[in-house]
Amino acid sequence: MDPKEKKELSESDISAKFITPAVVEAGWDEMTQIRREVTLTPGPVVVRGNLSSRNKKKKKFADYVLQKEKGVPVAVIEAKDNNHSVSHGLQQALGYAELLDVPCAFSSNGDGFASHNKTAADGEDTETEFGLHTFPSPQELWERYKRFRGIAEPEEALVTEPYYDDGSGKEPRYYQAEAINRVIEKVAQGQKRLLLVMATGTGKTYTTFQIIYRLWKAKKARRILFLVDRNILADQTLVNDFKPFGSVMTKIRNRKIDPSYEVYLGLYQALTGPDEEDKIFKSVSRDFFDLIVIDECHRGSANDDSAWKEILEYFDGAIQLGLTATPKETKYASNITYFGEPIYTYSLKQGVQDGFLAPYKVVRIDIDKDIHGWTPPSGMKDDLGNEIEQREYNQIDMDRILVLNQRTKLVAERVMKLLNATDPFQKTIIFCEDIDHAERMRKAIVNASGQLAKNNSKYVMRITGDSIEGKAELDNFIDPESKYPVIATTSELLTTGVDAKTCKLIVLDKTINSMTTFKQIVGRGTRIEESQNKYFFTIMDFKKATELFKDPDFDGEPVVIYEPDNDDDPVPPDPEPDGEGDGEGDDEGEGGIKKYHVGGVTVFIVSERVEFLGEDGQMVTESYRDYSRKGIRQEFASLDDFLQKWNGAKKKAAIIEALAEYGIELPKLAKDVGKDYGDFDLICHIAFDQPPLTRSERANNVKKRNYFTRYGDKARAVLEALLDKYADEGITSIENNNVLKLDPFRQLGTPVEIINGVFGGKGQYEEALQALETELFKKAS
């Protein structure tokens, strides 16, 4: 091909005509080994106010991912058009290679390839360039991959065992594939104690299913036990991710292990208990299970040290995989001590930055008696006639020792104020100090919600360990299709393991000192559910719990503090002051101290501030308007730069789309600034402090200039109608030729008749439209 012609080709043409044929020529199967245009991460969700949008500028999108087998990537190629150098895309490709943890990255402009090889031997160049017809073969890149990952020849068969494929084309996300592959590789190398750390909402169960499926199909594990601690988790697993196991899978029921199955789902409670006759896991031999997977393995280790450990110690010859969102490392308990260092970690922070997890905004509310404290007058008695101990009560005492009825009412009213201002039917969890507090909060919400609770008695439910009625509604609460219950008040029950995908509001009226508990609570809202328009969630904090976001341990690396010796107490004390269970007494506070219930003491909010999760992982207070201003100024260096690009753009929609890549959606901005302003004025006003004109004002200015006199009657009628359309709907509506199919244009002829008959062809029509836009935007004010 002529070099000049080649430079006219688009990136996609370069890929189709030069890069793909070169890779196929090297022996790569186009159907099974070459993945094109792979979205590795969708880009983070930006939240400001009650608005959200994706920052697509931070989307990670690989032009090519080469794989040995489905889900086993070995290399990345970044394509560029021929106006770039061969190596121009190599840095970009390297970023994707590090994300996928593969050794080889390539870049091409259609003339040849630039290569980065992390496995280059001493004396060899790490980066090289070579011609189009010498791309490495699948076997060569596979050998590099094995060296890079430390895979020996005998381990290769297990490492390449295929993933389960349901025919839908579903691919594991990059971090899921990495977690799965790491486990398979470690098992192939003979490791038997494994720990995976994956944030809530990142698909641990799907990841687990693929691990178990591949080990089962390879006959590396013939009998598998998946241990959970909640009935609902076992039932969700049976009908969802694990469904492909079909008839070889069973849930352990009736305190009996039926040896005729291969995949077993079991609750700790169904397998063991305090008495010897409860320990039904001993009814089978110690080598019965080849693989045991423990879901949420941080639980039980502190509160009941023997719950899962005695099962694992009995089946100590099995491969044992622990799954957790929050590695528990305290003075008293450590799952890292048992399983070893995590073989892979995918954190909440990484999930939010990638765009797989929902970010959060925090509404922090301080109540006067919490912040300034409250001392009862001398001799004051509570509502039951008990004399109140004379001392200052502050935030940590509220609803544990001191119950101020007006405070509960104030919290409920503030929660309902937010819900009524956004969506009174968004799923909400209110975390309370204990069961008594959860019941009083339920009652306060009923009163604060007015007609909403009258219309349906299940609008708010207390879902705690002791409430049969509340627990019966748990399935409905987490079901996206079920409208009720809308609000759940709880103390401990909903902190973990409940897959409430559509939960949009988490209210913290609970003192939280444990980072593990805090992470678990935050995890209730982190799932993105696009079908339900759930892209972010709100945390309303009355107890300063969100101060833990500032702790370096939030999403930081866990540290082993304590390794128990043989002589240590097997049931250590619970170090967490907030670790009360759902079964505690209704009317007693910490340590069995009676609570004081006091009415008539007024309370009020002394401060309230809203913070958003910034793209650097830090909390910021900026508005959507401030965020948009920064983004526009990233795209356009100055007002003159913007005006030049706006006036030079054949279609203004291209500029609007470029801003949308940053997560700046002008229609959302118009809600904040004014819906009558057009895109041009929104940009000039927000980013460059220009006084804005409404669309109608701009249209009227054009009419006043007698601009249309240069056109004939029919052309003038079309242009005047376009001007009116702009005034009503904005610039993008008149740039779309389909507008000519609508009234009043239909009365002037068909689109073809207008474009050809009135203006003399498409080129002339577009010129007239461009001239009209120039008139509209002659000035920035």
Image (cartoon, helix red, strand yellow):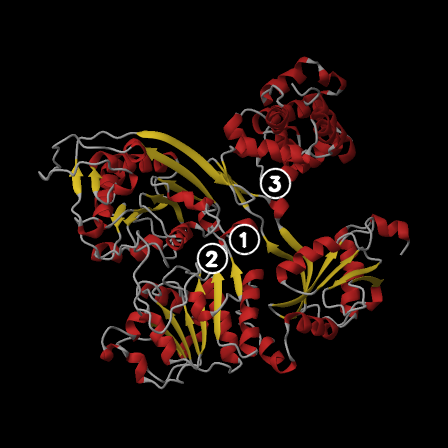
> Which quarter of the image is occupied by the N terminus?
bottom right
Q: Are marks 3 and 2 in contact (CB under 8 Å)?
A: no
Q: Quadrant of residue 564?
A: bottom left
- Choose mark 1 or mark 3, whichever is in front: 1
According to the picture, the residue beneath numbered tag 2 turns out to be 199
Q: Is residue 528 above or below residue 610?
A: below
Residue drawn 26% across the image and 73% down it: 273
Q: Is residue 279 left or right of residue 330?
A: left
Q: What secondary structure is found at the residue carrying circle 1? A: helix
Alpha carbon distance from label 1 to label 2: 9 Å
Q: Residue 88, position in %: x, y?
A: 78, 52
Percent from the top left, x then y, of residue 630? Answer: 61, 33
Estimate how packed mark 3 is, as few (under 14), some (14 to 19) or many (20 or more) residues with alpha carbons within 10 Å: many
In the structure shown, which secondary structural element does the residue marked by tag 2 occupy? loop
- Mark 1 highlights which residue? 350
Which of the marked residues, 1 or 3, is nearer the chain's N terminus?
1
The reply to whether dot 1 and dot 2 touch (C-beta < 8 Å) is: yes
Where disc 3 sits, the SS reads: loop
Identify residue type, mark 2.
Ala
Q: Residue furthest left?
A: 385
Give the spatial CA distance, label 1 vs label 3. 19 Å
Q: Note whether 14 is above or below 768 in the view shown.
A: below
Sequence-earlier tag: 1 or 2: 2
Which residue bears the numbered disc 3? 662
Which of the 4 image quadrants contains residue 31? bottom right
Name the one closer to the observer, 437 or 529.
437
**Amino acid at circle 3:** Tyr
The CA distance from mark 3 to mark 2 is 26 Å
- Proximity of marks 1 and 3: CB atoms separated by less than 8 Å: no
User: Residue at the spot x=58%, y=48% of the render?
Assistant: 43
